[in-house]
């Protein structure tokens, strides 16, 4: 069960972006597993992709296409990742772009393909292509929820959010959707997430904004430390709001836009954790007073990836010894354990490298019984800090991943 | 259930080493949870300890004592790690050494303390001290199995092995025991393991041998990537075999001794994985033809720590896409995926970065159904290689670690 998430019933349309879905039968019959996103002419799109050396075929094609032509269509399927198939995978991804281009009357390079699902299984490109006309026929602006549902794999709930801000007297809308679940530790990129806005944004500034907000959202989450082969994030700006061009020079306007964008991105990144495979708890890890951000990240991710911390979290067990052991093996040079403090929410559990004198098991248990917990580690070495979101490791994570292909 | 392990019924005594156990009631009543090892005068001991910055109090005391006096006694308890307790923990560890010293008539610095169990719980030093006379009274040479049983925590079976070699016309015996189970990724050190030999060995050479064999045994295993606060490994040499002094200069003699030692260490390290928490399968990961050992280790450990690879292993699912994804995120610079080959035992599953043409799911399944599997990754970049042992991630790992403190 997802932690603190409801089906998003108020996703706002973005003028200039239409979405269509269809049932291609990629993995299951009769499931809406194909999504087509149409972006109006004159829009700008920015994207970041997985840094995994084995990136999937659609990632390779999308990465090339987005630099060759203005993007007009995103074609997304769930149920099969089109990864690990060598040249055959590339052929399939390109063929699906060709089909969209022919039917929609655009350049094939204006189409970006995306896939999510099982790695290494033959990609049923004919079934996918056969469903494209249905997806085109169903294109409409008010279909973000249907789109969020179409891209789900082991996700248990559709995830999306909308946000508004006023720039230059014009109301700007941002709507984004995300799929996540497992194999999640985005690295300069993310799972599959599509964010549209009607703001009028200069292309270079759009890419800079994307990089900046991904850095504090999708690049700060982890379920299992496994960076996917298919992570992709696309930010589309149609300009339909007719604000004067956002290019980063007007400080007030940039700040408003970036703040709204950051809100959407952090919501979506957190949502991926709230709906992680087998999740029962959302853990926010704040590492403070480090010498630099890099060592703060080392500590935060060592805790976030520790199977022992994650199983204790699942058991609602304030087993702070495991947190301490994780910090101790994070590779921080000359760590002074006597300067260290650890808090569960506002309960101090460790001070001077040992259990705090005023700590009681009851106080720790009270925090651990919650669904959403903040763990704060103060290193006492400087002024750098970081924040990472993760979840627990439950029976269901094992069950889902032991049974995923069957 | 441990994989391919039986209770060791033929552990050979080592002349000059006596072992005694007692029930101290550290965590459970009436359990033999205290072990005392006596080493004869004139013996030499070498040790390596955890690199975790939060090393437990007994590790701090043992590390200091072994450099101050010739070691005569090792005092080991299970059920409580004496870790995370600050100054109080040090006081307890020293007090227990003092008690042994007083009763046995030796310097307190000749006693090394060791603890394993829950981190952060008050250490019942009075109960431990009260049981020391019983442990002393039960000291005898032929008690290695009882010793292996006394140091178990979530281990399901006692683990130990003996090996013999002939040096200088004299038969040399080596016997070792180990406890493991979880929080296992030794780093220049190990869990708790005690190895005795009657060989006559020079102290500097003994320490060099220990470092060398630990490097290819305990430093090549991982259950969950969590380096413990209490890892300790002690190698004791009594000299009772009366061989001419082994100091590394006689090449043939050194090779015989080191080969026997390596056999014992690799057996014990593997045994820790075979009896890991929730284990159902032993996975040997060979990474070959890397540019250097460091990148081979990065690839091997990224696979070994991937929750997705480990759950697929539990499900006996030849989900090679997850292996490929793990290799792809291991951080190897300029990895040429087209040069890559992956084998499950002798079945080639990936060639040129994609599923091998002659691979069949049946062949992959046949290997995955075994209890012991070798995964070979050929990077095609050079001549470096590494070998790492790990296990699967099962429901029982989660269960054991979600319930461990209760």
Image: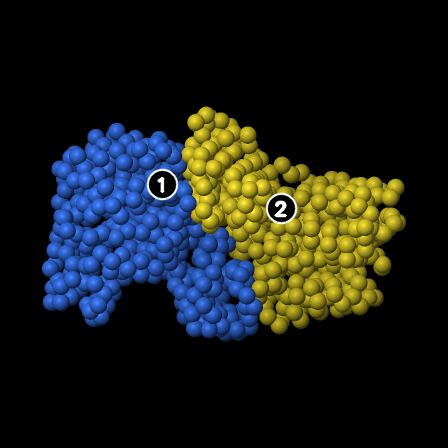
Chain colours: A blue, B yellow
Mark closer to the observer (2, 1): 1
Q: Which residue is denoted by mark 1 in the rendering?
A: A56
Q: Residue at x 58, y 64 (%)?
A: B53
Label 2 element class: helix
- Asked whether, in this view, residue B26 is left or right of residue B308, the answer is right
Is residue B41 at least partly visible in the picture? yes
Q: Quadrant of residue A243?
A: bottom left
Q: Which residue is denoted by mark 2 in the rendering?
A: B272
Position of residue B153 measured from the top left corner of the image (x, y, whole percent)? 62, 52
Q: Residue furthest front?
A: A68
Q: Tell me the chain of label 1.
A: A
Position of residue B339 measured from the top left corner of the image (x, y, whole percent)? 47, 37
Q: Residue at x 87, y 48 (%)?
A: B243
- Asked whether, in this view, residue A393 is left or right of residue A41, the answer is right
- Asked whether, in this view, residue A101 is left or right of residue A282, the answer is left
Position of residue A329 measured from the top left corner of the image (x, y, whole percent)? 54, 60
Label 1 element class: loop
Q: Front-most of B406 and A301? A: A301
Q: Residue at x 33, y 42 (%)?
A: A60
């Amino acid at each position: 069960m997802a932690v603190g998430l409801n089906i998003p019933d108020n996703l706002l349309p973005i003028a200039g972006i239409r979405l269509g879905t269809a049932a291609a039968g990629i993995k299951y019959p009769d499931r809406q597993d194909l999504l087509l996103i149409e972006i109006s002419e004159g829009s700008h799109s920015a994207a970041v992709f997985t840094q995994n050396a084995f990136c999937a075929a659609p990632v390779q094609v999308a990465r090339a296409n987005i630099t060759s032509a203005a993007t007009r269509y995103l074609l997304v399927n769930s149920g099969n990742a089109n990864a690990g198939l060598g040249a055959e995978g590339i052929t399939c991804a390109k063929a699906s772009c060709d089909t969209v281009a022919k039917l929609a009357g655009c350049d094939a390079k204006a189409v970006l393909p995306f896939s999510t699902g099982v790695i290494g299984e033959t990609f049923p490109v004919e079934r996918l292509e056969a469903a494209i006309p249905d997806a085109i026929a169903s294109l409409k602006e008010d279909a973000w929820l249907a789109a969020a549902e179409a891209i789900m794999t082991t996700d248990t709930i559709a995830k999306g959010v909308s946000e508004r801000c006023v720039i230059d007297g014009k109301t700007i809308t941002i709507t984004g959707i995300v799929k996540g679940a497992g194999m999640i530790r985005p690295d300069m990129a993310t799972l599959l997430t599509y964010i549209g806005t009607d703001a009028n944004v200069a292309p270079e500034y759009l890419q800079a904004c994307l990089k900046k907000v991904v850095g504090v959202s999708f690049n700060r989450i982890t379920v299992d430390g496994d960076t996917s082969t298919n992570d992709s994030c696309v930010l589309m700006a149609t300009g339909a709001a007719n604000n004067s061009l956002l290019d980063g020079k007007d400080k007030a306007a940039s700040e408003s836009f970036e703040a709204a964008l950051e809100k959407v991105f952090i919501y979506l990144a957190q949502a991926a954790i709230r709906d992680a495979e087998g999740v029962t708890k959302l853990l926010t890890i704040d590492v403070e007073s480090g010498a630099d951000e890099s060592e703060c990240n080392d500590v935060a991710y060592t805790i976030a990836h520790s199977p022992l911390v994650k199983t204790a979290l699942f058991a609602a067990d304030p087993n702070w010894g495991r947190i301490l052991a994780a910090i101790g093996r994070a590779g921080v040079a000359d760590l002074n354990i006597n300067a260290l403090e650890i808090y569960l929410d506002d309960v101090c559990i460790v001070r001077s490298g040992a259990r705090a004198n005023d700590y009681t098991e009851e106080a720790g248990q009270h925090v651990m019984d919650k669904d959403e917990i903040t763990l704060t580690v103060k290193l006492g070495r400087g002024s750098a800090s970081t924040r990472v979101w993760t979840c627990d490791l439950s029976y269901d994570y094992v069950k889902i991943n032991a049974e995923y292909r069957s």
